[in-house]
Amino acid sequence: MSIHNIRLEVMKLLEKDINTFVDDYLIPVEKIWQPTDLLPDSQNEAFFEDVKELREIAKDLPYDFWVVLVGDTITEEALPTYESWLMDVEGVDQMEEGGGNGWAKWVRNWTGEENRHGDTLNKYLYLSGRVNMREVEITTQHLINDGLDIGTGRDPYKNFVYTSFQELATYTSHNRVAQIAKQYGDKKLSKMCKLIAGDEMRHHTAYSEFIRRIFEVDPSEMMIAFQDMMKHKIVMPAHFLRESGQKIGEAFEQFSDSAQRLGVYTAQDYIDILQKLIEKWQIDKIGSLTAEAEKARDFLMKLPARMQRISERIVIPEEPHIFKWVQPALIK
């Protein structure tokens, strides 16, 4: 049987438990929090007073913080691209009678949860008065128009490695933003980001469980797929980020520099996430590997230390890049 057909068989095997995955790792629509629970209620008589309070508290947050919050928001707002990508993964069939197979159900339900994140942060940014929303909206539209290439192709094994890594990275970023917002006295924004981080952690747990189960039935190919993803490095979903008038990807490095300076998401976090995945999937203990997969395991086990040495040479600019999204005159 070809590698392609084996992957499809494994996806069908996992699909038998898709309803359990949905029940265990996602929250029913009627029970989960919604953006309106966390933002000033426009139907409330106190709406304008609540907005005024939000804007006053927001004035204390520093420049790099706003850059990171805008970048995180735009990343979350580009959700249509991520859903269409996942719907094209081998083993995911949205055309089956009854609304598609179990994997299509998972992708739709995951998308429904993720969609709330961009909605929440976008409304906060709009109400805060601290950013140029038109420029933010232009960047968001560009990011959706430009699509993405995360190096996985249609391979479900590689896609699950990517989502396992990426969901943990977004948990880290949103959780740190929540901590910083709290330090500056913005308890409501802190709560928003904390709840978003909680969603990301649940999603990470789900995708990493999919990988764990694949290792049980197809360990060698799963190991090689993991190695392939890490060899090419996990790129962030917003790696094509650009402002108006820029080329594709031109704004991503400056955004990443802001995140590094702020300590929200750093090169060290990348290494730590890789190490956590190696430990979670017990890469050192997996047996019945082919010679090629053994080499892949050896590469993965040595990679964190190798990356640690490289990260120590990284130099981040001290002064922030001035974005069209965030005008320094507004951040005082």
Image (cartoon, rainbow, N blue to C red):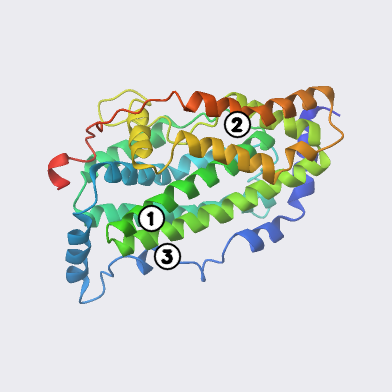
Quadrant in the rendering for residue 22: bottom right
Quadrant in the rendering for residue 119: bottom left
Check disc 1: other Cα within 10 Å, few if <14, some if 14-19, many if 20+.
Answer: some
- Name above or below for residue 185 compared with residue 82: below
State the residue position of label 1: 179
State the residue position of label 3: 34
Residue drawn at the location 70% of the way across and 55% of the way down: 18
Identify which amino acid the numbered label 3 is placed on: Gln
- Image coords of residue 285 (percent x, y): 80, 39
Disc 1 vs disc 3: Cβ atoms closer than 8 Å? no
Identify which amino acid the numbered label 2 is placed on: Pro
- Name the side, left or right, on which 272 lies relative to 330: right
Q: 329 or 163, which lies in front?
A: 329
State the residue position of label 2: 304
Helix, strand or loop at mark 3: loop
Identify which amino acid the numbered label 1 is placed on: Gln
First along the sequence among labels 1 and 2: 1
Disc 1 vs disc 2: Cβ atoms closer than 8 Å? no
* Placement of the N terminus among the 4 image quadrants: top right
Q: 171 or 80, which lies in front?
A: 171
